[in-house]
Image (tube, rainbow, N blue to C red):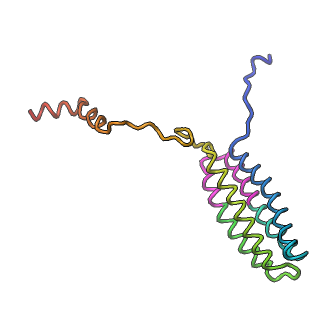
Amino acid sequence: MAGSTAQRSVGVTPEVRLALITLVAGVVVVALVALGAGLLRGSAGLVAGAIGAGMVAATFGLAALGLVWVAVRAPHRAAAVLGGGAVARLIVYALALAALSGVEGIDRPALAISTLVAFAVLLAIELRVLSTNPKLFGVKASSEPGTTPARNPNPDEASHEAASSPSHASEKEQTR
């Protein structure tokens, strides 16, 4: 009975890989940015760094999880979700920074700089994963990375082949 069951190889999809890398990187970025802000600006900087970097990591993580959800259900919409998620993140950052600017006990420069640094680092990581994974969103690469598709060394051959096709042959006979 066990032999009749088809076995599938279970692997991590490219979208899940992107989500996992984003989530792990987010945790590391929050810790490092908060620590750096705390060392430079004291306890208010630590709080601001944790809030700013945490907000960025949370939005990147939610966008990555949304991407995985869409890739499973409607893969043809995954690229739109990726682009829409980027725009939504920017709006969330602007609104959150504006809302937090009046809160006492938060170092405003540390909050803004922490948000910017975390965004830059996580965006660079996301773009790196996207650019090095051609199978993401079901894209089938036609050649190996670093190579170019084979080209016809004699471009005139294509025009000669087209000229010798049956339709061209009958046109030639008519002009004679």
Locate residue 159 relative to residue 84 in the image: left or right. left
Task: Give x and y (percent) for residue 36.
Answer: 83, 68
Q: State which quadrant residue 158 falls in.
A: top left
Most prominent secondary structure in the magenta stretch?
Answer: helix
The single residue placed furthest to the front in the displayed view is 40
State the residue in front, 138 or 20: 20
Q: Is residue 34 magenta?
A: no
The single residue placed furthest to the left in the displayed view is 176
Task: Give x and y (percent) for residue 170.
Answer: 18, 31
Q: Is residue 140 above or below residue 64?
A: above
**Residue sitting at x 85%, y 78%:** 106
Task: Give x and y (percent) for residue 151.
Answer: 41, 38
Q: Is residue 73 magenta?
A: yes
State the residue in front, 6 or 31: 31
**Residue sitting at x 17%, y 34%:** 171
Q: State which quadrant residue 60 falls in.
A: bottom right
The single residue placed furthest to the right in the displayed view is 43
Q: Quadrant of the N terminus?
A: top right
* Residues rendered magenta in the picture: 60-84
Give the number of marks: 0
Q: Quadrant of the C terminus?
A: top left
Task: Give x and y (percent) for residue 45.
Answer: 85, 75
Locate residue 21 relative to residue 146 in the image: left or right. right
**Residue sitting at x 68%, y 60%:** 123
**Residue sitting at x 79%, y 58%:** 26
Q: State which quadrant residue 48 falls in.
A: bottom right
